[in-house]
Amino acid sequence: MKRLLITGAAGGLGSMLRKRLAGYADILRLSDVADMQAAGPGEEVVPCDLTDLDAVTELVAGCNGIVHLGGRSIEDTWEIILNSNIIGTYNLFEAARRNGGPRIIFASSNHAIGFHPRSEKLDASSPQRPDSLYGVSKCFGENLGSYYWDKFRVENVAVRIGSCLAEPRDRRMMATYQSEADFERMVKAIFRASRVEHTVIYGVSANTEMWWDNSHADFLGYQPQDTSEVFRDKIEAQPPVDRDDPAVIFQGGGFAKAGHFED
């Protein structure tokens, strides 16, 4: 790959991926509205406001692939979600179309399906059940990806990210955990695949407790190597949870339990 764009490069996932993908492409083009470290060898730092379509179109020019992590990563007001996650994501897909359709990895979220109970195992065909305005914005991005593939043949993979952290923080994350190394493996598998069309995949490691089925996406070649089970003793030392708590009943956890952000 000659030039790979990472939006949201100043964030937690973006910063992690910047390090892990060093040397993967000839040039890593890194973009955010927040401050970023200066460009190192094989990097370009290009600040960009995703709500500016002309600027995003210029940002995408010359890129062979895109990892779209930009936008608000937690629940917020409708105005912020609208601009950061809906208008910004539309601009990114439209800019890709205008620039010949580089393959896109779209950072979706488990909060697009957060109101499914934990007792229900999901795959890509399971109905969207967002647990927040944030989750609604991720449903929009997934559906936008479907539209841009069907109408314009812009290939894209929507990754319903679980909890990509150094280690799980609580019992819920024992199921949603994805290691940083597995996230890297997944990204590389998606760009390595000969054809992806529009695919939805769950970003998760090979955990013992599993709510999500990725067998529909086996053709991508993503094979997680890590598991949350190595953290079992540490997590089990935490106080027990209330099994009747909505944060425990639903896959979205605290997002499903929380009230409407605007109230």
Image (cartoon, helix red, strand yellow):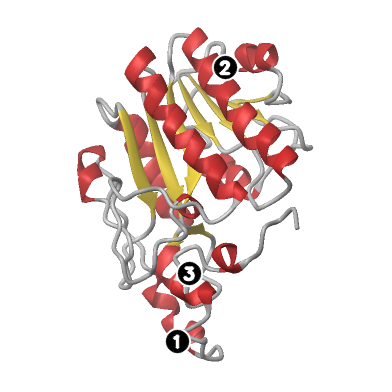
Residue visible at 54% across and 63% down? Answer: 166
| View extreme (right): residue | 35
Find numbered disc 3 in the image and state the secondary structure of the residue it sits on: helix
Residue visible at 73% across and 40% down? Answer: 80
Q: Which residue is mark 3?
A: 173
Residue 259 appears in the rendering? yes
Residue 151: give x, y in percent of width and height: 36, 15
Between 152 and 102, the one nearer to me in the picture = 152
**Around disc 1, counting alpha carbons within 10 Å, would you say few (fewer than 14), some (14 to 19), or many (20 or more)?**
few
User: In whole angstroms, how far apart are the C-alphas of marks 1 and 2?
Assistant: 45 Å
Mark 3 or 2: in front is 3
> Is residue 138 shown above or below 46?
below
Residue 15: give x, y in percent of width and height: 63, 44
Q: Which residue is mark 2?
A: 60
> Is residue 120 shown above or below 129?
below
Find numbered disc 1 in the image and state the secondary structure of the residue it sits on: helix
Callout 3, which amino acid? Met
Residue 4: give x, y in percent of width and height: 51, 25
Which image quarter holds the N terminus? top left
First of labels 1, 2 by sequence position: 2
